[in-house]
Amino acid sequence: MTKQRSLKTALAVSWALLVLLLAGFGLKLLNDFVLAPQQGTPSRPTPSPAKREERVITIYFADEGASKLIPERRFAKLGAGPSADAKAIMAELIRGPQSPGLLPTVPADTRLLNAYEIGDMLVLDFTHELQTNHMGGSTSELLTVYSIVNTMTKNMHGVRKIQMLVEGEEIENGRNKKRERKRRRERKERGGGGG
């Protein structure tokens, strides 16, 4: 009877330890994959600065007719983490093309204030020069947007979407303007005023 009792006790203790071990593992997974990532923090581990190396990147500039984007390859030091890599890549795009027959798509005095990842989206926060010193025109605006999007998604591993801000605010573009005009028209039709 005592042998059977000690066997049951040993089995109960083993089960309790197993449950505690699994619970601890579950909490670690929960913390690592659900609770730890927060907005503005890189979703991937940041490599040490010692791993920075020159890599070939592809940047997109406008052709002479400003009707389509043409890729240009060059070197940039990458590997310091998503934010630093995004800034290095944008610096090359802002610097402008080196190949003859290509036109810049981003005003030269534009600066990238901040860059961070949220899942597979890269958020880029620019200075106001992106808008105030832009050459203008809807085609030119589209070339700028696609130049940035194509350049970043091509060179930043795991980035599938881009959100662009100007000094922390969403960029006002043609689609936003049309949406706002439509909302005003609908409010006016309902008698809610135009403003």
Image (cartoon, rainbow, N blue to C red):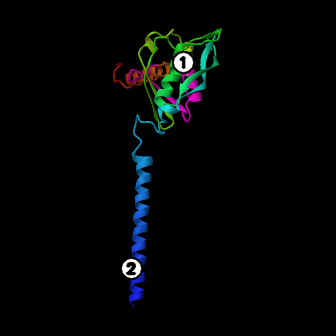
Residue lying at 43% horizontally and 11% vertically, measured from the top left? 132
Which residue is labeled 2 in the image? Answer: 9
The amino acid at mark 2 is: Thr
Rendered-image quadrant of the C terminus? top left
Q: Is residue 194 left or right of residue 99?
A: left
Residue lying at 44% horizontally and 52% vertically, measured from the top left? 29
Rendered-image quadrant of the N terminus? bottom left
Residue 170 magenta: yes
> With respect to residue 18, does 69 lie above or below?
above
Mark pair 2, 1: CA separation? 68 Å
Q: Is residue 153 left or right of residue 18?
A: right
Residue 157 magenta: yes
Q: Earlier in the sequence, mark 2 or mark 1?
A: 2
Position of residue 79 measured from the top left corner of the image (x, y, whole percent):
52, 31
Residue lying at 58% horizontally and 28% vertically, measured from the top left? 155
Is residue 14 visible in the rendered structure shown here?
Answer: yes
Q: Which mark is residue 92?
A: 1
Q: Is residue 150 left or right of residue 130?
A: right
Position of residue 115 measured from the top left corner of the image (x, y, whole percent):
45, 27
* Region of the chain picked out in magenta, as a range: 146-172
